[in-house]
Image (cartoon, rainbow, N blue to C red):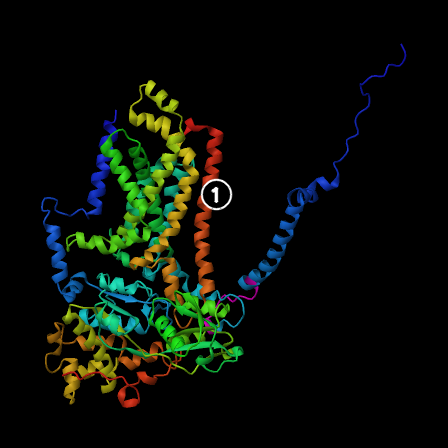
């Protein structure tokens, strides 16, 4: 009946490549950098700033810099004088810790890796054994750092440098999380005694700046304690930092707890779970997952706050850096010093933030019940 | 169902209490803590230091040459040397010192609260600090005066021509007050740029955030020595104030103030009598000069009067040498700071350093 026009195509479609302007690097640049007029203006400004800053910074840090020398007078060039860091990195890391014993904090730091990774990563090799080891780790580390068991004793006022930041920061992080969880649960408890104790603690500690708590620990505590009792100043700092972080963590976790629909609580009760089990198995896994960004945020803040120990006469990495740079042989090198110190904090804080992102993504895939 | 949780929470509360209280507090005797407070106040500073086993010394790590760490991680500097000498006089060991870094603002609360035993932090002796703040200055270890540094391109030859200039100034110091006085009495205006430490001020000045920087002349010399283009800057001729810097202690324990005072005097007298770190042991065996013999303990009972060992002065001098040796090592001509003795020379050598006799 005639050649009926059909809508059916008989030949193969010729596959056309997309226009060059929308693929590859050109496409990416157009889409991401020049998609609109405001975007284009921002791109041009950013490129201008980067082009002015990066060459100067690169030249200062690498090309014109000098890596060795006896004192600042041997650093003749206009760039950074890394000779200073080269000569003093031991003090930056270990403070006044005796040079012959510096292997001890180094070993303690290396042992930290197998102690902490099995808790951070699931299915880590030898997980079960390593978790047993990590419970023993605080004791091992204390013996290594302070002495005992055949090692000569090092008083804690010799602790300093980045080692001190790590000790205070990590102890604070590890101790404040469980305490924070308990405070958060306690604040929502139905028993008025516990509830008011927790509210009192959280609000008091959150209402004070950390620097004030440190002063209190240093000046007021010795007055209340009997004269023959002295609490080590590093221990005092750890207690205060932990208390401070725990109050913040408690509020972060309380936020998570409130986000859990009441159906979850009721379902757990209907299953006949005890309070402890319903929290452990149903509520906390969900609440903690929601709270991860807030918790890590608090930890990062805590880690940076460890530099405040300078006010009670401990010399952390920043304090010892200030003391070293007043050496007449080296004075005037504060830029190098602060860049170097900042690098340490950046590495630690950036790792923490990347880890929390990784953990969030992983938990999203697996679902809450597979903790 | 709250039982488990309740027990847990109580446990935490108890553990927390025990930790905070040091774990050794006798809970039954509640009157004890009240008694302890009064005991602390009454106990002499020397006793407290001896019991503690170290001297707590307030310092300033912000001023080059006065307190810093060397490449071995040992404390050094002009102010530190005094702490070491004092520890040596008390313990016979100059290393028994705990250093507390203090800023211009928190140095006085730290001393008043008993956090430190002595403040050796280039602090100016003034009427109100001595009288109203309740401290005892035990002498002058460095005679300083406030000056100005500025760029030569400003075209200014004297500080009196600085009308309208912006001035970098450390807060909480006497220099801040002197500056206001100086500009007011010369009827010229200035714009203060408040700064916390010497290093910050150096940076601010180099970044041209202020036209001139004012602080003690010793600090200016130290700061200028770090400039790459030092000949583009000048220190103006005016010294606008007297800044007698020295160590200080809390008022109320005169015995401790005496120990601190006479340790400083021993260092100054040692230079005058020609006692130094290398010959002090030999001279301590006895000399023809009775004054040296009294000071070094081979005659008389000066150490005993202070409640210290008779070798207190020997130990103090051995710690870092006499005043002249300390000055030369940390501030003098052969250091990067290159400060002249000037007023700080012994009174026999054209300076005003003059310590009372050891008798």
Relative to B64, say whether A126 is above or below: above
Segment tinted magenta in the rendering: A62-73
Name the side, left or right, on which A243 lies relative to A124: left
Q: Which residue is mark 1?
A: A354
Name the side, left or right, on which A38 lies relative to A6: left
Quadrant where the C terminus of chain B is found in the figure:
bottom left
Relative to A6, say whether B114 is above or below: below
Picture coordinates of residue B314, whole percent (x, y): 19, 78
Picture coordinates of residue B121, whole percent (x, y): 30, 70
Relative to B128, say whether A362 is above or below: above
Question: Could you tell me which chain the residue with mark 1 belongs to?
Answer: A
- Residue B207 visible? The answer is yes
- Residue located 20% across and 73% down the image: B260
Name the side, left or right, on which A10 lies relative to A358: right
Question: Where on the picture, by quarter, is residue B304?
Answer: bottom left
- Residue located 18% across and 70% down the image: B90
The one of B344 and A233 positioned closer to us in this rendering: B344
Q: Secondary structure at mark 1?
A: helix
Q: Main secondary structure of the magenta part?
A: loop
Question: Where on the picture, by quarter, is residue A257?
Answer: top left
- Residue located 54% across and 78% down the image: B153
């Amino acid at each position: 009946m005639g050649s009926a026009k059909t809508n059916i195509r008989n030949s193969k479609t010729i596959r056309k490549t997309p226009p060059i302007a929308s693929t590859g690097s050109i496409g990416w640049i157009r889409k991401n950098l020049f998609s609109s007029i405001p975007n284009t203006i921002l791109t041009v400004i950013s490129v201008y700033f980067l082009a002015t800053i990066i060459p100067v910074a690169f030249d200062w840090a690498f090309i014109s810099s000098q890596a060795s020398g006896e004192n600042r007078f041997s650093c003749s060039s206009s760039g950074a004088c890394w000779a200073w860091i080269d000569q003093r990195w031991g003090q930056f890391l270990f403070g006044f810790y005796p040079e012959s014993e510096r292997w001890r904090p180094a070993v303690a730091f290396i042992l930290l890796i197998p102690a902490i990774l099995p808790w951070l990563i699931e299915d880590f090799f030898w997980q079960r054994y390593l978790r047993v080891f990590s419970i023993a780790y605080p004791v091992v580390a204390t013996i290594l750092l302070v002495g005992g068991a055949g090692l000569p004793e090092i008083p804690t006022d010799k602790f300093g440098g980045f080692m001190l930041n790590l000790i205070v920061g990590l102890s604070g992080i590890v101790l404040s999380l469980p305490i924070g969880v308990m405070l958060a649960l306690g604040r929502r408890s139905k028993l008025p005694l516990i509830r008011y104790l927790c509210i009192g603690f959280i609000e008091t500690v959150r209402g004070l700046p950390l620097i004030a708590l440190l002063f209190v620990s240093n000046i007021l505590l010795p007055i209340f304690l009997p004269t023959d009792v002295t609490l080590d100043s590093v221990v005092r700092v750890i207690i205060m930092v932990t208390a401070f972080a725990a109050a913040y963590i408690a509020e972060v976790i309380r936020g998570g707890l409130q986000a859990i629909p009441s159906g979850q609580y009721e379902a757990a009760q209907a299953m006949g779970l005890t309070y402890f089990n319903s929290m452990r198995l149903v509520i906390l896994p969900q609440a903690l997952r929601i709270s991860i960004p807030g918790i890590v945020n608090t930890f990062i803040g805590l880690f940076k706050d460890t530099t405040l120990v300078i006010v009670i006469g401990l010399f952390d990495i920043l304090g010892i850096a200030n003391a070293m740079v007043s050496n007449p042989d080296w004075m005037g090198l504060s830029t190098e010093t602060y860049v170097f110190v900042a690098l340490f904090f950046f590495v630690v804080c950036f790792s923490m933030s990347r880890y929390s992102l990784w953990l969030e993504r992983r938990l999203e895939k697996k679902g809450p019940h597979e903790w | 169902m709250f039982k488990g949780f309740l027990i847990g929470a109580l446990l935490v509360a108890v553990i927390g209490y025990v930790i905070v209280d040091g774990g050794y507090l006798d809970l039954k005797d509640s009157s004890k803590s009240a008694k302890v407070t009064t005991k602390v106040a009454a106990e002499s500073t020397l006793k407290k230091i001896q019991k503690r086993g170290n001297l707590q010394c307030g310092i300033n790590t912000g001023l080059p040459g006065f307190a810093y760490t060397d490449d071995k991680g040992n404390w050094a500097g002009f102010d530190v040397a005094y702490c070491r000498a004092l520890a040596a006089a008390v313990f016979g060991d100059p290393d028994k010192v705990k250093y507390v870094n203090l800023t211009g603002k928190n140095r006085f609360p730290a001393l008043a609260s008993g956090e430190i035993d002595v403040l050796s932090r280039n602090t100016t002796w003034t009427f109100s600090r001595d009288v109203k703040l309740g401290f005892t200055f035990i002498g002058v270890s460095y005679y300083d005066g406030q000056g100005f540094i500025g760029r030569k391109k400003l075209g200014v030859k004297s500080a009196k021509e600085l009308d309208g200039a912006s001035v970098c100034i450390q807060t909480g110091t006497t220099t801040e007050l002197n500056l206001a006085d100086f500009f007011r009495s010369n009827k010229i205006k200035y714009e203060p740029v408040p700064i916390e430490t010497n290093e910050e001020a150096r940076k601010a000045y180099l970044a041209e955030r202020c036209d001139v920087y004012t602080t003690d002349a010793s600090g200016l010399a130290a700061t200028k020595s770090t400039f790459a283009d030092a000949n583009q800057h000048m220190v103006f001729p005016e010294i606008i104030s007297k800044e007698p810097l020295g160590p200080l202690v809390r008022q109320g324990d005169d015995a401790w103030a005496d120990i601190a005072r006479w340790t400083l005097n021993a260092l100054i007298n040692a230079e005058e009598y020609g006692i130094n770190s290398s010959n002090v042991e030999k001279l301590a065996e006895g000399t023809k000069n009775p004054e040296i013999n009294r000071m070094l303990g081979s005659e008389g009972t000066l150490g005993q009067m202070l409640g210290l060992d008779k070798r207190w002065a020997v130990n103090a001098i051995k710690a870092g040498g006499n005043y002249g040796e300390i000055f030369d090592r940390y501030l003098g001509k052969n250091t990067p700071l290159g400060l002249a003795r000037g007023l700080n020379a012994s009174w026999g050598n054209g300076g005003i350093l003059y310590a009372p006799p050891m008798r």
